Amino acid sequence: MAVGPSLRQLHAHKAIHNGGMAGAVSKTDQVLECLENGDTELANALADDLLQYWENRIIGHADAEEEGFYREIVKGNAYMQETITKLTRDHDLLRIIVADIHQLRQSEGLSPEVLHKLQSLIVVNEIHSRDEERLLF
């Protein structure tokens, strides 16, 4: 798959990460605020939107990286395979956490464990983005 220029340039790639993270944090805060205000119906609707955001925006970006950008890096620099494997594992962790949240919400609703996992997505993505920017550019 051809890689677009925004994935290859640090400033553009960092802007993608920052924009994605800002949206995830804002949407997570909205869920928490609704729960604090006792509006569980709206909190659940916002949680649905938040998970869709993680799947489409953040994990969608991860998929694009893996399908093109990461392959391009390894093709030109075989010594980068271990780094790419580690960064791909970060993406896998995001996918696993999102799947866990979906499953937990079916049985527990917006439980404390679900809220904890929503926060963990932010932490994992923050560390991943910083490492990716440092190691690949």
Image (spheres, helix red, strand yellow):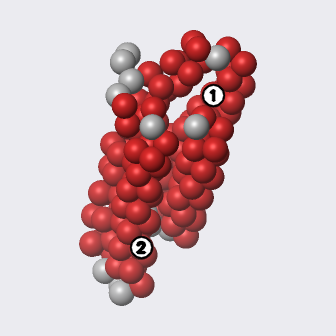
Q: Amino acid at mark 2?
A: Asp
Is residue 128 something that shows in the picture? no
Contact check, label 1 and label 2, Cβ < 8 Å: no
Q: Amino acid at mark 1?
A: Ile
Q: Secondary structure at mark 2?
A: helix
- Residue pictured at 36% horizontal, 73% vertical: 30
Label disc, if present, on residue 66 of the rendered structure? none
Name the residue beneath numbered marker 1: 84
Residue 118 percent location from the top left of the image:
50, 60
Label disc, if present, on residue 29 of the rendered structure? 2
- Residue pictured at 30% horizontal, 57% vertical: 49
Q: Nearer the viewer, residue 78 or 93?
A: 78
Residue 72 percent location from the top left of the image:
51, 18
Q: Earlier in the sequence, mark 1 or mark 2?
A: 2
Q: Nearer the viewer, residue 74 or 44?
A: 74
- Residue pictured at 44% horizontal, 43% vertical: 13
Q: Quick check: 135 left or right of 108?
A: right
Quick one: quadrant of the N terminus? top left
Answer with the quarter of the image where residue 86 lies: top right
Image position of 42 with respect to 16: above or below: below
Q: Secondary structure at mark 1?
A: helix
Q: Quick check: 48 left or right of 81?
A: left
Quick one: quadrant of the C terminus? top right
Is residue 136 something that shows in the picture? yes
Q: Residues within 10 Å of mark 1 (few under 14, many from 20)?
A: many
Q: Quick check: 77 left or right of 36?
A: right
- Residue pictured at 36% horizontal, 87% vertical: 37
Residue 7 percent location from the top left of the image:
42, 34
Q: Nearer the viewer, residue 109 or 50?
A: 50
Answer with the quarter of the image where residue 133 lies: top right
